[in-house]
Image: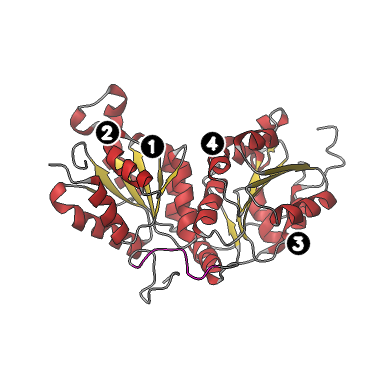
Amino acid sequence: MPFPAKDFVGLLQDAGFDFFTGVPDSTLAGTFATLIERRRFIPAVREDEAVGMAAGAYMGGQAPVVLMQNSGLGTSLNALISLNLIYRQPCLLLISWRGHDGKDAPEHLIMGQVMKPQLELVGIPHRTLTVGTIKEDIAWAGAVFDKQRIPVALLVTKGILS
Amino acid sequence: MRPDDGVLASRGRAIGAVLDVLTDELVVVCNGFPSREAYTQRDRPENFYMIGSMGVASAIGLGVALAQPDRRVVVFDGDGNVLMGMGTLATIGVLKPANFLHIVFDNEVYGSTGNQPTLSQTVPLDAIASAVGYRNVQRVRACDDLAEAARTLLTSEGPSFLLVKVSRQVEEVGRVEIEPVAMTERFRKAALAKRGFGSAEPSAGRGGIGARSDGRTGPR
C-alpha cells in the first residue's frame, strides 16, 4: 500500500519544511497535487532555477524542499555544486527515481543507473524512501539539513507515495 | 565596438550609481565582474555575491523575495546570466513578487571570458520582461537617468525590470574577499535582522528545521 501523499506532505510540514518548489514528475504526482491544493507550491521552469530559489528562500529564513524527476538532477548539478554546496545553503531534494531497476522508458535508464553514484560523487547524502520508514527518513533528512547545512536527497521510487 | 560605446557609462559606474540610492534593500549580485565591482564600490551586509552557478542570480533573488515579502529585493544581473536562465523571467512575471526589482547591466558581451558577443546585441531583454508580465519595465543608458529610474522603481509595486545599457569597460577591481559560507551567514542575518513595514511575525517555519531553538526565526 502506498503511503498517502497528503500525510507525507503533512509530515514534511510538521518537520518544519515550509517552502516547496520544483518541476513536476508523475511518480510524485500526488505530492504535487497536495501542495498545489494547499497553495504551498511555487512552480519553477527548470530544476536549477528551483535550486536557486531554494537557496534564496533559505537565506530568507525558510526551510526549502525541491521536488524533481531525476533527469532534473542533471540540470541542477552545477547550481548544487557551485552554489548550495559551496555556500552551505541546505535544501531537501525530493527526487523521483525514474529508471529504477532498469524498468522505464529509454530516456530514464542511464540516469536511473547513475543517479546514486552521482549524488555520492558530489557529496549529497541520500536515502531511498520506504513506506515503513517515512517518518525516520524525513527526520534523518532534517538532521542533515540542520547539522551539515547542505542539500540532502530523499529518493522516491514508483508506488511508495499515493 | 558599438557606436554608442564611447558615451555609455561603464557597468562599474552604473552599479555604483544604483548602490548609492539603496538603503536597506537586499541585493543579489550575479557572478563574474558585477559581483567584484559591487564589492569594490560599496560592500554592505545586505549584498550577496554569487561566484558560480551562472544563470541563477534572479532565481536566488526570487527565493529571497518570496521568503521575505516585506523586504525589497534587488538583483544585479548581466545579459549573459539572463540569457542563460531566461525561463526565470517567466517565473517572475507570473509569480509577480511586488518587492522584486531586476536590474540588468547589459554590455552585450561575456565580459569575464574575453568579450565574446551575447545575443542581447539583437534580443531586447526589456521587451521579453514586458511580454512575460513584469509590472514595470524601463531601459536607460546613462548614470543620471539610472539613479532616477532606480529610485522610482524601488518605490513602485514590482516586479520591475530595469535594463541598463553599459559599455564594455571593466573597472579596476579585486576579488570578493568574503568566504562563501561566511557570505551566506552574513546575508541571511541581514535578511532576518529587520522586519519591513507592517509585519508582526517572522514569515518562516513553525519550529524544527531552519528555525532557532528559541522558536524565533534566524540563523543558529
User: The residue tagged with tag 4: helix, strand or loop?
Assistant: helix
Q: Amino acid at mark 1?
A: Gly
Q: Position of residue B214 (x, y in %)?
A: 38, 77
Q: Which mark is residue A98?
A: 2
Element on which disc 2 rests: loop
Q: Is residue A152 left or right of residue B95?
A: left
Amino acid carrying label 2: it is Arg
Q: Residue furthest top?
A: A106
Disc 1 to disc 2, how far (Cα)? Answer: 11 Å
Q: Are marks 3 and 1 on the same chain?
A: no
Kindly report which numbered mark, 2 or 4, lies closer to the viewer in this rendering: 4
Q: Residues within 10 Å of mark 3 (few under 14, many from 20)?
A: few
Q: CA distance from mark 3 to mark 4?
A: 30 Å
Name the element at disc 1.
helix
Question: Mark 1 — residue?
Answer: A72
B41 left or right, relative to B57:
right
Query: Which corner quadrant holds the N terminus of chain A?
Result: top left
In magenta segment, residue B201 = yes
Alpha carbon distance from label 2 to label 4: 24 Å
Magenta span covers which residues?
Answer: B199-207
